[in-house]
Structure formats: C-alpha cells, structure tokens
Amino acid sequence: MNGPLRHARHLIRVAALFVGLFVVFLFAKAALVPKDFGLYGHYRPSALAANTTRELSYAGRAACVDCHSDVEESRKGSKHARIGCEACHGPLARHAADPGAQAPVKPDPRAFCLGCHAQNVARPATFKQVDAEHAQGEPCSTCHGPHAPEKGPKP
Amino acid sequence: MDPAALPVVQGFLYPNEAELQWSILIVLYPFLTGLVAGAFILASLARVFNVHEVRPTYRLALLSALAFLIVAPLPLQLHLGHPERAFEMYLTPHTTSAMAMFGFVYLWYLLAVLLLEIWLDYRKSIVLWAREKTGLTRRFYKLLTLGVDDIGPEALDLDDRAGRFITIVGIPSAFLLHGYVGFIFGSIKANPWWSTPLMPVVFLFSAIVSGIALVLLVYMATSALRGKAVDMACLDTIGRYLLYAFLVDFAVETLDLAHRMYEADESFKSLDFMVRTKLYFSHIVVQIVLGMFVPIAILGLVQLVKLSERARRGLYAVAAALTLIGIFAMRWNVVIGGQLFSKSFLGYTTYKLELAHREGLGPAILLMLLPFLILWVLVKLFPPWEEEDEAISPVRAGRPS
C-alpha cells in the first residue's frame, strides 16, 4: 500500500477486525433472536403458547377431593379449610392422575407449619403466629391435626 | 422455607423488606468497576495530562484496569444466575432500562477503550516479541500483531496519536462507566438512602480514589516481588494525586451529607438512627474514620513533613490499604445499608452473610482474588516493566506529543 496510509496498515486491520466482529454479531443476532420477538412489545408472543404446552404441576383442590373426600370432610369448619391442598403438599398433578406414579411426601410436622405461622412482624397482626416456645420442643402435630388444627391432634 | 433463616427484624417492615435481595456480590460489583475506572484515570494522567512521574505505572495501571474489568460483571452474573442469558441484552437491547444498557457501556469500555489502548501501547513490544520468541508464544504474539510488523517511526507516531485520542475518549468513558453505577442507585427514587443526583459524582470520585490506591499498592507489591526499588518520584506523585482525589471525594460526600441533614426529609430520622446503630461500625468507624480521615491525614502529613523514603513508603502502603478498605465499606454501606431500613421508616432488618453460599462470603473472596490472578497472567504475557525497553512505549519514552 502506498500513499499517506502506508504506515496505518495495522490501524486499518484493527478497524477491519472490529467491522468483522460487528458483522458476525449481526449474523448471530439474526440467527438467535426469535422471529416473532418485538411483534407486540419487548417480548416473544409465542412464549405464551409455548408455556401452555408445558406439563401442569398442580392438579387443584377439586381433583384431590375426588379421592380424599375424608380429608375434605375433616377440614370442614376449620381455619385451614380454605387453604389449597397443594399449598402444603406441594405440586401433585402426577399423583392425582395416577396415585402410584408419585408418592406424596408428608410435610415435616416440626418446621413446616412455622413457614406460615412463625412470629414475623411483616405478617398481618391478625394472623395467628407462635413463637419458638409455643411448641415446647414437640412437633406441631402432637397437639394440632394439620387439616383442622384448632380441633386438637388428629384422632 | 426454613423459618430459622428468617432474618432478625425490629419494628415494622413491609413483607418484602425482611430479606435482602442485593447481597455482598452487589457490593463487590461497584467496588470492582470503581477500581477499573480509577486505574484508568491514573493511566490517563501519564498519557494525556503528561504527568511524567507516574509513567512507571502507566502500563501496570492499564493491565490492572483490564484484569478488574474482566471480573467486574461476574458478581452480577453469579447473583442473577443464568449467566448464559447475559448475552441477550445485546441481542434484544432494552433501551429504557439503565441496567440493561450497562452491557453496552461495558462493551464499549472494554473493546473500544481499554483493549485498543493497551494494544496500541504494546504494539511495538508485541512486534519485537513476535520476532524474538519461538514456538507457541511466537504465534500468540504474531497473531496479536495482526500480521503487520511496521514499527517504523511513522507507524509508532500514528499509534501514539491514536492512543492519545483513545485516552481522551476513554476519560469520559471511564466517568460514564462508574458514573453509571452511581446512577443506578441514585435513580431509585423509592429509596431515600440512594436517591440523590449526587450519587454518580460520589461514586465517581470514590472510584478514582480506590483505583489510584490499588495501582499504588500493586506497583509497590510488584516492585518488591521483583526485587526492584520503587521509583520514589512516581510514588510521591501518585500519593499526591491520591490526596487530591480524596479531597474532592471528601468534599462531595460532605456536601451530600450536609444536604441530607439540612433537608432532613421524612426519611432522615430513620436513616440517622440506622447510621448511629446498625451501620455505626461500617459507616462511621470504617468508611469515614479509618477509610477517609486517617488516609487523608497520612497523605497530608507526607506533604507537610519531610520524611525518609522508607517512612514514606510505609505510610503510602498503609494509606492505600486503608483507602481500599474504606471504599469497600462505602460500597457496602450504600448497597447493604440501603436495604436495612423499612420504607415505612418504622423498622429495620439485618443482613445475614453466609460463607459457603452462592452469594456468600466464599464466592466474594474468590471473585476478589480472581482479578489478581488475571493480572498475574497479563503481566507474564505483557511485561509492563520499565526496563523491558525504555523506548518501547511511546508514552514511557516521553516523546513530546
């Protein structure tokens, strides 16, 4: 190369390198950004459809009650009656479809209740909370049945 | 959830305030970027402002900036999880999110400023190394020459001018890089501990202070490790600039404090109480007294009293180490402090720092050591030492430009 740029060959190469990288980036962008991105906003609309095809994890209370009507019966009139079964038992859709396929794990009756009932100023004052002494070292289930806790231990 | 993990709280908090969302990793992040910006500003003293005395640290400062810049985003990625998604902010840029736009600030600073400047400054050395070395190292340097081994005076002159230009662009970029970090906090209007337009300025000057202190320490440590005498003129000059930067930083932080106290808005009582209790040690003791007053006093003393070289070296090392601790405490107090009080101003929570946890002390320590490891590799690959070749670096050679 001649002329005034004779000694700028290395600078031209860096510039070319940057341009090259940018072009690679543009190709990567074209290849990687989903086609429908930005159609309605800063998201991918087909994500909604994709999510609906995913397997459900929760069966819903109505499904549980079909088979465990005894539990529903024992909860009647209790303060826990309106809590969804899977709020405590975790997602059990596979169990509901086929009880043998997924064995529900029983919640640990010592630590588990405190997740909702431990003393915490952030909780509404009207919600019943207990401090560390309340259980006197016993699991909560010694004195409270989980499905109807105010009616004493489960018979 | 393990109920024992519930943090200790006092008074009234809103439900989402008991647990801190921004952990020590988010403390680390502004600390690291601050060091980058500060080290770069020190390098630019040599390059643009022609402060000849600090030349021995010029390349070291640039390499330190690079080492820390490489690590800077890692705490964020560890905090968020899914590091592979970070690239998506380039693919689908979210222009109204300050956090998302950081990706571009970072990339600009890394590619357009730091790497280019280092490359231009080292180009002559790289070409020479490519000629001298053999085997794999030779190929490595050869690759870096981009196939051009023109190191004639015209080409070097071009490098020098291009490098100067990049440094001039780099200074506002370094300001942007760190001012931006302050902006992120300063623009959160719901949080009175953070929300102030002074935040970017405070972050910037504390960044400069910490970066200068870092390079000072790295320079002293590397000299000691190599068994070389430190250049006292260089050290004295860095010490002086550290003092200047500190005085500005002090002024800005005092302004912020005075403004808060005089304004005394509805949050003031609550924040004041927090500073006097929960933050007392990290804010008053470490950040302000140990991390600011003591180093300023030491650096000022060195200016006023004639001391032996040995004494000065020791004092500089102590001042710089305290400075780094103080600036780290400052980041801690901003990030953690801003989450300890309730936005109801009626309660406080505590931060439980775990050791072996994804966001715990362990990873934080590792992330803090990583830049030094990278710096070690960089120094091996690109020795920044004076005696390598007096004439190699256009800046080092002090050619009038």
Image (cartoon, coloured by chain):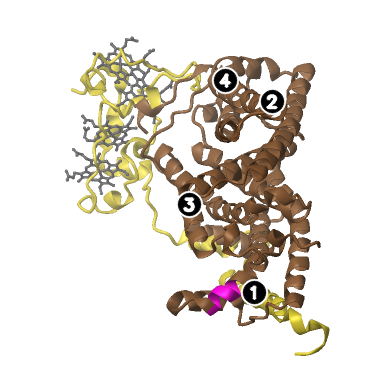
Res B107 → quadrant: bottom right
- Ranked by sequence position, the earlier of labels 4 and 2 is 4
Q: Quadrant of the C terminus of chain B?
A: bottom right
Q: Residues within 10 Å of mark 2 (few under 14, many from 20)?
A: few
The alpha-carbon separation of the residues under discs 3 and 2 comes to 30 Å
Helix, strand or loop at label 4? It is helix
Query: Is residue B192 shown to the viewer in this render?
Result: no
Q: Which residue was labeled with disc 4?
A: B285
For marks 1 and 4, give the one nearer the viewer: 4
Which color was chain A given?
A: yellow
Residues flagged by tags 4 and 2 on a common chain: yes
Query: Is residue B369 shown to the viewer in this render?
Result: yes
Q: Which residue was labeled with disc 2?
A: B305
Q: Which mark is residue B226?
A: 3
Residues flagged by tags 1 and 4 on a common chain: no
Residues flagged by tags 3 and 2 on a common chain: yes
Q: Which residue was labeled with disc 1?
A: A26
- Counting the numbered discs, the total is 4
Residues flagged by tags 2 and 1 on a common chain: no
Residue B198, image x, y percentages: 76, 34
Res B394 → quadrant: bottom right
